[in-house]
Image (cartoon, rainbow, N blue to C red):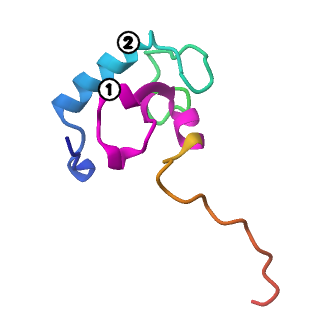
Amino acid sequence: MSHAWAAGSTRQWRRLRRAVLDRDRWICQLCHKPIDPTRRNPDPMSAQVHHVQGKAYGDDPAHLQAAHRLCNQKAGDPTRAPDPAPRPMTRW
């Protein structure tokens, strides 16, 4: 299943997202703290679903887990290289 995020989420994705959140009992699987279902994006503690193997591997529920928005952003996409270390600028 592929997502065209530019067009927004699909009904199918929203159903799957809700199923994953319910399965994980609205507990963030990254920090193990409760997720408040009343919080909405862009609240850092709002509910999201983390792709454990990265979005490139699809939306198999076995590889999805409930997460806070902040925790999901910190975890990042495991298929992408991490950001390089900052380097000091000596010339402008």
Up-down: is 20 above or below 91? above
| Disc on the earlier residue, 1 or 2 | 2
**Residue 75 locus on image (x, y percent):** 57, 41
Q: Residue at x 57, y 35 (%)?
A: 70
Q: Residue flagged by tag 1: what amino acid is it?
A: Pro
Q: Answer whether residue 46 is magenta in the image.
A: no
Dividing the picture into quarters, in which one does residue 19 lie?
top left
Q: Secondary structure at mark 2?
A: helix
Rendered image: mark on residue 23: 2
Contact between marks 1 and 2 (CB within 8 A): the answer is yes
Could you give the CA–CA distance between mark 1 and mark 2, rounded to whole angstroms?
10 Å
Q: Quadrant of the N terminus?
A: top left
Q: Residue flagged by tag 2: what amino acid is it?
A: Arg
**Nearer to us in this view, 44 or 1:** 1
Up-down: is 74 above or below 48? below
Up-down: is 78 above or below 49? below
Dividing the picture into quarters, in which one does residue 23 lie?
top left
Q: Quadrant of the C terminus?
A: bottom right
Magenta-tinted stretch:
48-74
Q: How many marks?
A: 2
Rendered image: mark on residue 51: none
**Residue 11 locus on image (x, y percent):** 17, 29
Q: Which residue is mark 1?
A: 61
Q: Is residue 64 left or right of residue 13?
A: right
